[in-house]
Amino acid sequence: MEPTLLGRIGYAFLSLFVITNYGLLLIGSMARISAKVQGRVGQPVYQPYIDIIKSSVKRNAISHGIMFYLGPVFRLAGGVGTYMFIPAVFGSVVFRNFSDSGDLLLVMYFIFFGQLGMALGAGEGGHPYSAIGVSRGLAQMTAFEVPFALSVIAVAIQYGTLDINAIVGAQQGGFLNWTLFTNPLAVVAAIIAFLGMSMHNPFSVVIAPQEIPIGPPTEYQANLLGMLQTNRAIFNGAKLVLYMNLFFGGATNILVMVVKTFLIYFINVFVGQAFPRFRTDQSIRFFLGVPTLIGIASVIIAAV
Amino acid sequence: MSDKKIIPAPLANEGLPPDERGLFCDAAPREYEPARGIMEDFANWARSESLWILGFGTGCGAIELRPLMTSRFDMYRYGIQPRPTPRQSSVFVIGGYASVKTLKRIVRSYEQMMGPKFVVALGSCTINGGMYWDSYNTIKRIDQYIPVDVYITGCMPRPEALLAGFQELKKIIRAGRAEGQNEYARNFEWFKANQKKVIKDWNMPDYNW
Amino acid sequence: MNELAKELAARYGARDWHDRRGDLSSTVVDPIRLHDTLAWLKDSAGYAHLSFATAVDNIERGVFTLTYTVRNHEQGHSLMVHADVDRANPVVDSIHLLWGQGWTYQREMKEWFGIDFPGSPRVDEEFVLEGWEGPPMMRRDFDSLAYSDATYEGRPGRVTHDPATRMQERLYPEAGK
């Protein structure tokens, strides 16, 4: 039975709650795995939760104006918006979100939207390191959007639609129907773009963890920082679910979703632990080189 | 928080040129009352389990912080991690001796941190001057200028001693005794007078959030 | 190298040539001829690199001894040129036109010893100290301990031990008796 609008909103909140917790646990467990690779014990899996709680119970906070508050709000809206228009579990009533209301182009727009909003907010902070982080982030984003967009075009040509539900539906019935096997070039280009999107090594210079400029959120503190941390979890989850839907056959229940997204995220850790960091100009050249050519090739193959 | 508190007089910011005074706040810091009962206990637990160190090496002792990140000592397992900006960090590690020039930066960074904020003073120099007891340019007691929660003795203390100090800090935070921010606000005049006594060219705002 | 010693002695009255190592020698000139000596060393003798310039307070003799270390990279030889400047009136010719980095050293010497280098860029600006109001602190008649006690709050109860006697007392208490 089709649920009412109110019911769908309730389901959307439930779905959002699940993906937030899943994203946080994913970040925590990946940090733990990275620590094991480096021969350390590593932080507890629940450390992201404590960090968010701690940020939220700070006693004072500063403001740099209205845009400064809106930055994290836009970022969170970008994360939530990305997730809300992707079906997390194919055919599920609870986890399909609002995927029938928006298509792939809207999702791609939301991926970009958060970063732009963050750029405005961080600019209001007035810290020079924020501006450096924003310009690095936007430059790298523009670069990895090229192979990603090309691979999305290839997928759209292949399935003749931009509707994510239809794309997932076309991949059902055995793993040989996945885009991974029917259009491998597009998947390769998209996975390389994904490395840039998740900002792990070797493309981590944007957030530059634990260095002098920490990237756009240099001036953000207290509950605004907590909001950004929460968004990171949601955004990570949303991107993983999108990739799973487009290229790895989607998921028919939540267990399959968890296993598949975990493995996709593992690609990041695998590459990130093996390769050192690129400078921004190097990563731009990288994305506009071989991955773009692979993307073009995938479009040509899909078109002819 | 409470209305009973007297609103302190605006700061003069006399060290700044007139056209820059409007860029900085002129209100003195105020005290923040802790939440009550179990809420504060929970908040303190979260604060103690997520110590973010300000990545500002103020002296030679900062070299002892680096090994903590490595595989051998691995401070991440205690929820400690470095953070490059004072806005996000909650622990300030004073790494050994602080010259007057560094003290200026210490005061500004400390004031920019969001409360509750904790200070770990590292090495003998922060306690009584250490080997710089007769130096012309090194302060002898850091607690005259900013409130300190934990001292770690030694010259230099080993990374193990630092980890022990962080465990001690965690106990203090959980017990609710790490109220350095409020102490700073309560004794603001005294701290400022001490700071201005040694920092002769005071060319920065009186209070920096 | 003795040709160089003779040449310097003949041209600029350099004296006390001393070979400290195979690749390091020193000589002494009058402060009034310091600039000319260094200029000649740089332009004609191949000592093109100023590696170091500093001063030493020889309070017993009432002079600051300036030391300029120049290096000849072709011969792999360094030469330290010393010059004694009167402590009461320490004014020396600036060498910032010979070596661009010279003014930094001169700014340092001005702040730390109070040696003046007229014409040197930014020589009166503070170098490493900010807001220093006392006398130049590297002069040996500056009492660092008294200044420190007067300026910085100390913690009461501080005790200083001599390491040798302290460890002897602790490890071998019977030996002291």
Image: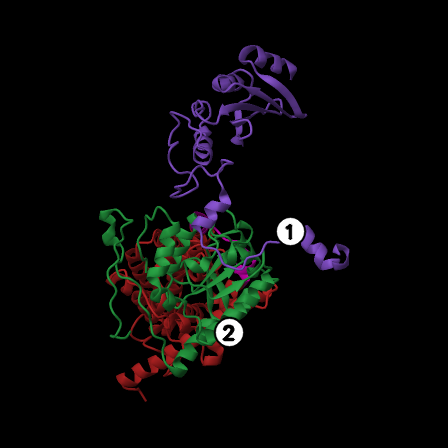
Between the residue at mark 2 and the residue at mark 1, the CA separation in whole angstroms equals 37 Å
**Would you call the spot at circle 2 few (<14 residues within 10 Å), some (14-19), or many (20 or more)?**
some
Point out the frontmost of discs 2 and 1: 1
Local secondary structure at mark 1: loop
Q: Chain of mark 1?
A: C
Label 2 sits on residue: B171
Chain B representation colour? green
Q: Relative to C169, is C80 above or below?
A: above
State the mark number for residue C162: 1
Start and end of the magenta stretch?
A270-286
* Badge 1 amino acid: Asp
Q: Nearer the viewer, residue A140 or A180?
A: A140
Q: Residue sitting at 41 percent across and 70 percent down?
A: B179
The quarter of the image holding the N terminus of chain A is bottom left
Instruction: Please give the chain letter of the residue carrying mark 2.
Output: B
Amino acid bearing label 2: Lys
**In front here: B179 or A275?**
B179
| Residue A214 belongs to the span the image colors magenta | no
Residue A279 shows up from this direction: no
**Could you say where residue B139 lies in the image, as x and y percent from the top left?**
46, 52
